[in-house]
Image (spheres, rainbow, N blue to C red):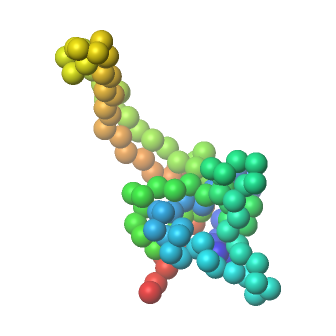
């Protein structure tokens, strides 16, 4: 993990985060310890939803392949939505209860705007 952090170019670590699937977090990272026996994974005592690895926040994204860990500053990741967001309304499904359903859909793609702001680790079996 420290090697992954070291791959990030200087200046991009302020605001950097780890991103991985829940499988990778709980099967590969969660039980990992340092040489002195301390766990590298910590949970914020004030807010149980914030998880950290070496002080950096962890983002869980199950669209990231298992055994892959990304580390970077996602402010330098660009998202393109070429056709905008389509919003639709339906009053039919909630007719008896008076509910209104809303649906928003978009086709989007993205990529790193600055490659040196990201690093990737693939764990082998």
The quarter of the displayed image where residue 25 is located: bottom right
Q: In this rendering, is residue 81 above or below 23?
A: above
- x%, y% of residue 65? 40, 66
The quarter of the displayed image where residue 4 is located: bottom right
- x%, y% of residue 35? 76, 87
Q: Residue at x 45, y 51 (%)?
A: 111
Which residue appears farthest toward the left when viewing the image?
92
Q: Residue at x 42, y 47 (%)?
A: 110
- x%, y% of residue 24? 49, 70
- x%, y% of residue 71? 59, 62
In which quadrant of the rendered image does the N terminus lie?
bottom right
Which residue appears farthest toward the right when viewing the image?
36
Q: Nearer the viewer, residue 111 or 24?
A: 24
Q: Is residue 44 left or right of residue 79?
A: right
Q: Is residue 63 visible?
A: yes
Instruction: Count numbered badges in the picture.
Output: 0
Q: Is residue 29 left or right of residue 62?
A: right
Q: Nearer the viewer, residue 6 or 32?
A: 32
The quarter of the displayed image where residue 85 is located: top left
Q: Residue at x 31, y 26 (%)?
A: 103
Q: Residue at x 57, y 66 (%)?
A: 119
Q: In this rendering, is residue 9 above or below 85?
A: below
Q: Is residue 3 visible?
A: no
In which quadrant of the rendered image does the C terminus lie?
bottom left
């Amino acid at each position: 993990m420290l090697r992954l952090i070291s791959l990030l170019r200087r200046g991009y670590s302020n605001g950097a985060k780890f991103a991985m699937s829940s499988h990778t977090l709980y099967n590969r990272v969660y039980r990992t310890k340092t040489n002195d026996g301390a766990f590298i994974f910590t949970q914020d005592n004030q807010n149980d939803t914030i998880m950290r690895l070496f002080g950096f926040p962890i983002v869980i994204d199950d669209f990231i392949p298992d055994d892959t860990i990304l580390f970077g500053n996602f402010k330098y990741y660009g998202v393109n939505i070429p056709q905008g967001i389509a919003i639709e309304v339906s009053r039919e499904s909630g007719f008896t209860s008076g509910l209104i359903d809303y649906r928003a859909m978009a086709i989007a793609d993205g990529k790193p705007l600055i490659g040196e702001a990201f690093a990737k680790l693939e764990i082998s079996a």
